[in-house]
């Protein structure tokens, strides 16, 4: 990867991967020249493979909005894993000089922030068949494997993991929700109430949503003071019918202890019977996107805690135009967001952008919400020259769009990495104060 850029960091880091690009709600498309890297105005290069060292370009930013990272720290010399995910507990712990359970050290009368950091990385469907889990108590300077690794040595497809993993943290209890992918038929939900030291596990989507789970499953927590429910959501694509998969959600109203099938699987006739048309975008359905032959891949489910009712959003991609679109994806490509205004009971679908021949499936679309409820959708797409028939290959750039009305309408796509001859892929974002977003790619 050529370079990483940083937007801005608030007093408390919003994600552990704090590399990003500075973007406001309205960003100019004009580029300015740096020594060797062209930047969108208002952004700066934080780290670059072509910078640093004797005679190299300085990694120091020209803007006061950025920070320079410390040297990399090895997490684990023994275990392997790819596609890592990092989460930071950025929620306040109650302060108390008399209550040891307050978890503030030294004891204080005001809330404290511990910034506990958790990481995971799938190692595939091999023994010992789980995704390793690491923890840091010192803001990422050092990591260790907790004493009890969740989903250890379980049978393939029956409650273990290793395929993919994702982490969410409870806003009130600091409970850690760690979902792992054991293969066909299930998703494993691991819960820790002692900051990742010990775990309890259960199987999600087993029986109520049979079928192969795609790459990949995602989890989001929405804890609320009693008597309101503390909801936990797990989303994934169900490939029971490969020609018409559907974007699915499982919901827990007891903070992840039990899950139920919110989504009703559509009845799809076996081939060669004609496939049903996808549900109209504005028609409420129990699944975020039921029986959709154009459905390709989906990003993490997101809770908007800034608005009443806590709306839910899932970014996803559609491709192709015929009944074999899932098997042989081809243009045209479209970006969508599934939205629920009733805590996952019903969903509608909202177009973000038509991309035509520009393929955005490398890899996940991703959405974040700032503290004012503005939405940001980030993705990577091909640029044209060098593409193959499926719209892959060739140069790729990272784009984003934003919505100020809950996803009903979106701004035209904005290219974050406009330099020609250089590719940028796999973006990720976290939004903070109104109008500000961090993007890493």
Image (cartoon, rainbow, N blue to C red):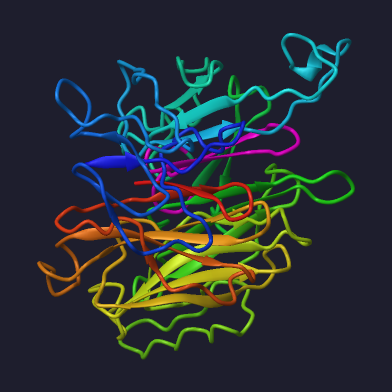
Q: Name the image quarter holding residue 71.
A: top left
Quarter of the image that includes the N terminus: top left
Q: Position of residue 347 (x, y in %)?
A: 62, 73
From the viewer's perspective, tell me whether residue 134 is left or right of residue 441: right
Relative to 418, does residue 226 appear above or below in the rendering? Answer: above
Q: Name the image quarter holding residue 203.
A: top right
Which sits in the foreground, 428 or 275? Answer: 428
Q: Is residue 324 magenta?
A: no
Say whether residue 140 is visible. yes
Write the residue at 30% across / 15% down: 77
In this view, the residue farthest toward the bottom is 274
Write the residue at 54% across / 87% down: 280
Which sits in the foreground, 353 or 178? Answer: 353
From the viewer's perspective, tell me whether residue 379 is left or right of residue 146: left
Write the residue at 56% across / 77% down: 409
Which sits in the foreground, 223 or 328? Answer: 223
Q: Name the image quarter holding residue 56.
A: top left
Relative to 75, does residue 283 appear above or below in the rendering? Answer: below
Q: Position of residue 272 (x, y in %)?
A: 30, 87
Q: Position of residue 350 (x, y in %)?
A: 53, 77
Say whether residue 209 is visible. no
Segment colored magenta: 160-186
């Amino acid at each position: 990867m050529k370079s990483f850029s940083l937007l801005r960091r608030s007093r408390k880091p919003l994600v552990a991967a704090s590399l990003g690009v500075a973007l406001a709600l309205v960003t100019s498309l004009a580029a300015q020249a740096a020594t060797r890297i062209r930047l969108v105005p208002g952004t700066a290069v934080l780290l670059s493979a072509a910078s640093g060292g004797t005679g190299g370009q300085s990694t120091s930013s020209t803007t006061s909005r950025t920070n320079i990272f410390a040297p990399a720290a090895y997490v684990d010399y023994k275990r392997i894993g790819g596609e890592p995910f990092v989460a930071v507990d950025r929620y306040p712990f109650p302060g108390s000089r008399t209550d040891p359970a307050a978890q503030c050290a030294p004891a204080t009368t005001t809330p404290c922030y511990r910034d506990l950091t958790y990481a995971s990385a799938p190692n595939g469907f091999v023994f010992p068949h789980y995704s390793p889990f690491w923890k840091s108590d010192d803001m990422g300077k050092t990591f260790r494997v907790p004493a009890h690794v969740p989903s250890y040595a379980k049978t393939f497809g029956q409650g273990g993991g290793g395929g993919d993993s994702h982490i969410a943290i409870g806003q009130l209890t600091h409970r850690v929700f760690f979902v792992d992918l054991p293969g066909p038929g299930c998703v494993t939900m691991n819960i820790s109430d002692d900051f990742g030291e010990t775990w309890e596990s259960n199987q999600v989507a087993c029986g109520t949503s049979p079928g192969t789970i795609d790459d990949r499953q995602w989890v989001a927590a929405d804890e609320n003071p009693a008597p309101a429910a503390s909801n936990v959501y797990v989303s994934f694509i169900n490939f029971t019918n490969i020609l018409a998969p559907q974007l699915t959600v499982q919901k827990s109203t007891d903070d992840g202890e039990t899950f139920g099938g919110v989504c009703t699987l559509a009845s799809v006739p076996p081939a060669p019977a004609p496939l049903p048309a996808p549900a109209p975008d504005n028609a409420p359905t129990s699944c975020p996107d039921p029986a959709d032959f154009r459905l390709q891949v989906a990003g993490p489910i997101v809770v908007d805690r800034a608005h009443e009712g806590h709306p839910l959003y899932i970014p996803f991609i559609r491709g192709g135009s015929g009944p074999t679109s899932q098997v042989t994806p081809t243009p045209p490509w479209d970006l969508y967001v599934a939205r629920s205004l009733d805590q996952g009971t019903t969903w509608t679908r909202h177009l973000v952008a038509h991309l035509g021949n520009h393929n955005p499936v490398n890899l996940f679309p991703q959405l974040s919400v700032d503290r004012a409820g503005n939405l940001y959708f980030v993705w990577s797409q091909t640029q044209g020259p060098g593409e193959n028939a499926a719209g892959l290959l060739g140069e790729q750039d990272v784009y984003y769009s934003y919505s100020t009305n809950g996803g009903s309408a979106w701004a035209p796509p904005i290219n974050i990495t406009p330099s020609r001859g250089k590719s940028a892929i796999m973006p990720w974002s976290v939004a903070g104060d109104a109008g500000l977003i961090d993007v890493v790619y």
